[in-house]
Amino acid sequence: MLGIPGPELDNETKVLLETVDPLSIIFFGRNIVNPQQLAGLISDITSFMGRKPVFAIDQEGGIVTRLTEGFTVMPGPMALARAGGETAAYEAAFILGTEMMAVGIDWDLAPVVDINRNPMNRGIGIRSFGTRKEEVISCARAFVKGLSDAGVLSCLKHFPGLGGASVDPHIDLPVLDISREELFDTDLQPFIEIDCPCWMPTHIYIPSIQNRKEAVTVSSEVLTGIVRKELGFDGLLLADDLNMGGVANSSSTEELVINTFRAGMDILSICEGTKNQINAFKALDDTVRKDEYLYRRYLESLERINRILSPCEGILKQGTGKIKNAESAATAARLAVKSIECIKKEAPLPPLSSVQNIFSMKRQRLVLVEEEGQGLFYAAVKAAELAECPLLEINSESTTEETKKRLLIAAGEKINLIFTENAYLDDNISNLITALAEASKEFYMIALRNPWDADITGIRNAWCSFGYTPDQQKAVISFLSGKKEV
């Protein structure tokens, strides 16, 4: 599985496809302008290759949404769990799947089935359906069914579970030091309980099930011993991107593709870097031709691929008229409204007209899997406009003098409102928020990402939207304007 450089079939992409002839192509934001452009790119690739590869994408909803302009943008998993649980998860997935099929995408690398057991986990958070395995299983199962009913293949990730980790595998190798019994009773349960033909093993080391310190991705103990023999899973194993720091920091890509394939992986993904992709393919191709065991592994994986991915082959079917209609847009807006939840409430939310100051963090890119984003949140800007009050940015780099000014502005019997995005992960911002809360007569929080911002000392009134898609931010404004009670 390869990522390609840009939004068109240029010469670099042609050389890559001609050299590697990949099974699958995965799209990212860099490849997508709008539905018509993407449908054209998919058609061009299919014509150029003389066959239809399997087209894949990470379309989880929320902060991991690749299809945006011209598509229906759904709230993410944790918001869906709040908006109606499995019913909301099915609705969202069916619409996402229908739109993927309309442009020619066969495979959604979703849902995330990590159980969010560690609030300090930057890489998962609201990408998870929740903190309880029962909630994750029921919502993810419904998401898989929604995709399937729309004609799209799904993939459970990230095996054997990233929810308890604190390190993002995009950056380095996480170590999850839990017992084998706890792993099987919690993190592995979604993979065991949900009927899905594909799992995505990720880059994590779990000492209780591995004798060597290495990523699960390259561990035959896990991929062959546990997945195939112990759990009896005979579906596809698709590697998490082999460019990620969790494995790339310790091995070359050429070594990784060989070792990952030897360990029991079926599909190897390298999501960027044309030269690196070509070199890795040549290394694997050369080794498989010489190594009898790897050739048997190749035949074994090929059987699974033919069995599971055969519905994705054949004639390319596209029909972009099915994308972002009035009904799908209304569903996304409704789910966004329903996802807002009260986390703490000592006093009712005051009308915006009584708020004297609004504070806000800027949007951050907390994990590499997110698309780039910057600037103050629309919801904060609009709220300040409606309240006819100042909008003041807070950040981790504020000088002592700037902090003093913020506190002076907040003090003096003022009613203040703050918009946050994972402020609890930054001590400087958390301390500033505590000081602002103490200085205020009344202080209210809207957490636009993880709900644990409400645990910051001094917070007594907090609501969470579990994400900040355009619809979710509009829903927040409706809530602040008194059009929804929570």
Image (cartoon, grey):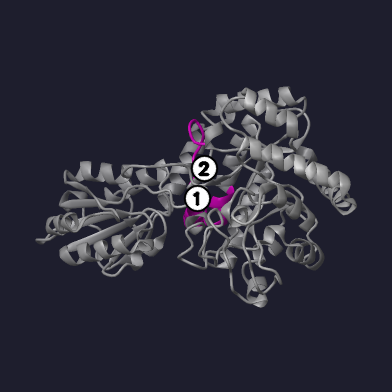
At 47% from the left edge and 54% from the top edge, which residue is drawn? 79
* Left or right of residue 359, residue 90 in this image: right
Q: Which residue is mark 1?
A: 76
Q: Position of residue 484 (x, y in %)?
A: 33, 51
Marks 2 and 1 sit apart, C-alpha to C-alpha, by: 9 Å
Q: Which residue is mark 2?
A: 65
* Left or right of residue 460, residue 142 in this image: right
At 51% from the left edge and 31% from the top edge, which residue is drawn? 325
Indicate yes or no whether the magenta region holds residue 236: no
| Residue 149, placed above or below residue 13 | below
The crowd level at tag 2 (other Cα within 10 Å; few <14, some 14-19, many 20+) is many
| Residue 195, placed above or below residue 74 | below
SS at circle 1: loop
Q: Are marks 2 and 1 in contact (CB under 8 Å)?
A: yes
SS at circle 2: strand
* Left or right of residue 458, residue 168 in this image: right
Q: Position of residue 310 (x, y in %)?
A: 80, 39
Figure quadrant of the N terminus: top right
Q: Position of residue 76 (x, y in %)?
A: 50, 50
Range covered by the magenta-colored residues? 67-90
Q: Position of residue 44 (x, y in %)?
A: 67, 23
Quadrant of residue 315 within the rendered picture: top right
The crowd level at tag 1 (other Cα within 10 Å; few <14, some 14-19, many 20+) is many
State the mark number for residue 335. none
Q: Amino acid at mark 2?
A: Thr
